[in-house]
Amino acid sequence: MESPSSIDSGVQDRIRQQEVIAELGQRALETNDLDQLMHDVSVAVAETLDNEYCKVLERLPGGDEVFLRQGIGWRDGLVGSATVPTDLDSQAGYTLISEEPVIVDDLREEERFSGPELLTNHDVVSGISVVIGSVEGPWGVLGTHATDRREFTTHEANFVQSAANILAAAIERASKEDQLREREAQLSVATDAASIGLWLWDIRENVFTADEFLAESYGMEPELVTTGAPIEAFFDPVPGEDKDEIWEQLDRALETGVFSAEYRVENADGDLMWMVSRGEVEYDASGDPVRMHGAVTDITERKQREQQLREREERYRDLFTSMSEGYCVIERVDTPPEEPIDFRYIEANPAFEEHTGLTGIVGKTIREVVPGERQEWFETYDTVVETGEPVRFERELVTRGLVLECYAFPVGGETDAQVGVLFTDVTERVERERRLEELIERLETSNERLEQFAYAASHDLQEPLRMVSSYLQLIERRYEDDLDEDGEEFLAYAVDGADRMREMIDGLLEYSRVETEGAPLEPVDLNAVLEDVLDDLQLRFEESGGEVTTESLPTVEGDSGQLRQVFQNLLDNAIEYSGDGPPRIRVSAERRSETDPEWEISVSDDGVGIDPEYSDQIFDVFQSYHEGEGYNGTGIGLAICERIIERHGGEIRVTSEPGEGSTFTFTLPAASDSD
């Protein structure tokens, strides 16, 4: 039966992927260490998709190879040294020319490419790879791989692409910062020489002079610029639509005394550059303008960044409006100390309005829109603002009959009191969980009734069975001399059947009392428990020539009486089903680590064994695998063992093959005061 926690796991995976991308994006903004960011992205992608490998491949000059710059899972020494060819037989090479993520379900069956050796030498089977940057000018490849066959989804591929986009943005930003630092150094030197972007316009003579920086930017001859020319000559490289704006600004500056304009210029290479020019007007004693002096600056990079920002904003807006999950951004409102805290809606997407039924809310406070909103939600949002940590919670919209799973997280800068809230409709999941809880409750009630019935039935059968046994014994004593051979045989069958019936009833009683008459769990030394069982079975071991080898056993939390019954049943079975030779039994214990909450106890023998096909059935009540083969047994001993182990919160299983013995392994909780 599917557990509640696995329901709608796809939505949970997508939310987790969004969280990881948000965390990586924040980390990219906070660090200038590209290699550390690449390593962090590799770890996050591999762990999120549960893959063994992840790599960041950097395209080398010439484009014939890519370099394993960062990654996880690869053999020692490869990261930082290995290279991969970019021919079309390589997944990396194929990825560099692919607009979409490259998804490989099984590399062994792949027809598009067969390598490279970096993947085949690591037994890679499945994976996703995407371009870092653009296909027209790729920086490299981000890839993640698994050694088992996987069918990755489009959402998982988009997740890897989002991680690659974060790397691309960080790489681009680092490159531009390097360029900016170089430009600043150049400008600093030039400024010291008093020759950067300076200009002067003699208004009366209409002579415009400037330095070499302006000449280079405008694609003009330096001699013409430095000796002077009519101002109209400096506007020749300016596109017509920008030229009109400049003249308007100049005319206005002659009246206001201040000039400022942004415009484009076509340089000598035919490229358009963005410039900003600012100046001040000097006037004579009559108030007439005499000259204007100022400076010009190349703002092409800033304009490009602004354009990229607008494009990213458009992509965000498309995602914001098209996503199926509801999303809103709220901002804490400044309120007097004596008044309750409140938040104002900054934005909300269509899915939010669809989920909540709230429209036209931007600019309003939550208390205005939802007067009955519970105080705890305001406290939750306030906690996110104060701590900067995300919070997940559920809320019920009674008016719409919906249950929403909410994920609140900080957005904006450090000084912003803004919270983003993502809503996912989990009404169906919650309803399924409710029905499941009701089913579990009904099953528990049914189990209680069955236990009561089993106890009552087995208890009530004791008296008529005693009567049957008594009369059989009376017949045997009184008519023993009168019975012929057949009569004696029939009577023996009847007595044997009555004895087996008594054993079955006793077993059923014991089975029904596991829960109701068990002692409280407390620390129990299994060495002492096993020693008592071996004392009780000493005669059977002597008769069978059996031998038991034991390891030191742990102290566990348990019911000593019931655990004694488990060992008694398992050892008794090992003797009973030892086959032709004397039984050889080994009792051992194992714990995976000191912090593991459970011990594994194993009881192994070299007896007749069990067909694996029946490894589950033998734990059912009255199921005996060797019934009819000359062995005694009611088929309830292992069922009692399972019931006892389950009461202790553990499980029991068997590993066996016919003729090769059996190993019964069960888990028990480690005692809290033991190692």
Image (spheres, grey):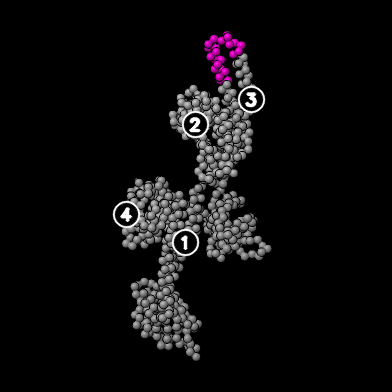
Q: Where is residue 659? Give x, y as percent.
A: 44, 29
Numbered circle sitting on residue 88? 4
Q: Residues within 10 Å of mark 1 (few under 14, many from 20)?
A: many
Which mark sits nearer the N-terminus, 4 or 1?
1
Q: Nearer the viewer, residue 194 or 226?
A: 194
Whether residue 554 is visible to the viewer of this picture, yes or no, is yes
Kindly report the distance in space between the C-alpha atoms of the residues bearing marks 2 and 4: 61 Å
Numbered circle sitting on residue 460? 3
Q: Which residue is disc 2 drawn over?
A: 585
Q: Nearer the viewer, residue 288 or 588?
A: 588
Task: Point out the image quarter for the C terminus.
Answer: top right
Whether residue 568 is visible to the viewer of this picture, yes or no, is no
Q: Bounds of the magenta span?
A: 476-498
Numbered circle sitting on residue 28? 1
Kindly report the distance in space between the C-alpha atoms of the residues bearing marks 3 and 4: 80 Å
Disc 2 + disc 4, Cβ < 8 Å: no
Q: Is the residue 260 above or below the residue 424 in the image? A: below
